[in-house]
Image (cartoon, rainbow, N blue to C red):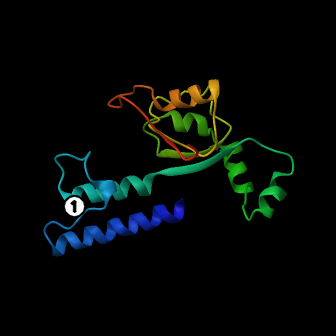
Amino acid sequence: MQKYWKQYIEKLKKALTSISAVNNPPLPPFTKGGMGGFSDKEQIKAQMQYMKDTDMAVVVSQEQNEIDKFKKLGLDIAKHRKRMVKEDLATKFKDPDDPFRIVFVCAMWMTGFDVKPLSTIYLDKPLRNHTLMQTIARANRVFRDKTNGLIVDYIG
C-alpha cells in the first residue's frame, strides 16, 4: 500500500508541475470533486499534504510463534506488533483529527469497535450473520458531513 501511496503522490507532484506550464491539465481522478471553490493547484497541494500526513498501520491479533510464521511469508510482524503494543491505536483511529487514517485489520476491531468517522471498509474474506452486520455498521455511522459509508467487497 505504501509503495502505491508514494507513487500516487509522485503523480500529484507531476500534475502540479504541469499546471504551471498548461492552464488546465487533467487532474488525477482522486483529486476531482469534493474540493469545490479551490483552484486545481490548491486541490493538488491539499491532496498531496493530506496523503503525506496520513498515517497507516496493521492491527492483527497476536499469535504464538508469529514472528517465525510471518518471516516465512517474507513479512516482518515485529515492527507492527511493537506499534500495536506501544501506541493506543484505537484512540488515535477514533479521533477524526488524527492523521492515523488507514488501518489494515485482521479480525480485531471488526465487532464492538465504534468509529463514527470511518467511511470505507474493504473486505477480503467472507463475513456472515452478526459479524457482517457489525462490519457494515462500522462504516454506516452518520458523522459530521458523512451520511453513509462505502463497503467494498472483494469476495462477492
Give the crowd class for mark 1: few <14, some 14-19, many >=20 residues within 10 Å. Answer: some
**Based on the displayed image, in which of its 4 quarters is residue 113 positioned?**
top right
Residue identifier under label 1: 41
Residues 94 and 36: in front is 36
Drawn side of residue 103 relative to residue 148, left or right:
right
Image quadrant in which the N terminus is located = bottom right
As drawn, the residue found furthest toward the bottom would be: 21
Query: In the rendered picture of this protein, how many numbered marks are placed on residues?
Result: 1
Q: Is residue 30 above or below residue 90?
A: below
Q: Which residue: 49% across, 64% down?
A: 4
**Based on the displayed image, in which of its 4 quarters is residue 48 positioned?**
bottom left
Q: Is residue 21 above or below residue 37?
A: below
Residue 119 rendering spot, x and y as whole percentages:
44, 37
As drawn, the residue found furthest toward the left would be: 23
Q: Secondary structure at mark 1?
A: helix
Residue 47 rendering spot, x and y as whole percentages:
33, 55
Image quadrant in which the C terminus is located = top right
Q: Which residue: 84% across, 58% down?
A: 68
Drawn side of residue 156 relative to residue 85, left or right:
left
Q: Which residue: 41% across, 64% down?
A: 8
Residues 110 and 49: in front is 110
Residue 131 rendering spot, x and y as whole percentages:
63, 28
Amino acid type at image mark 1: Lys
Q: Is residue 114 above or below residue 89?
A: above
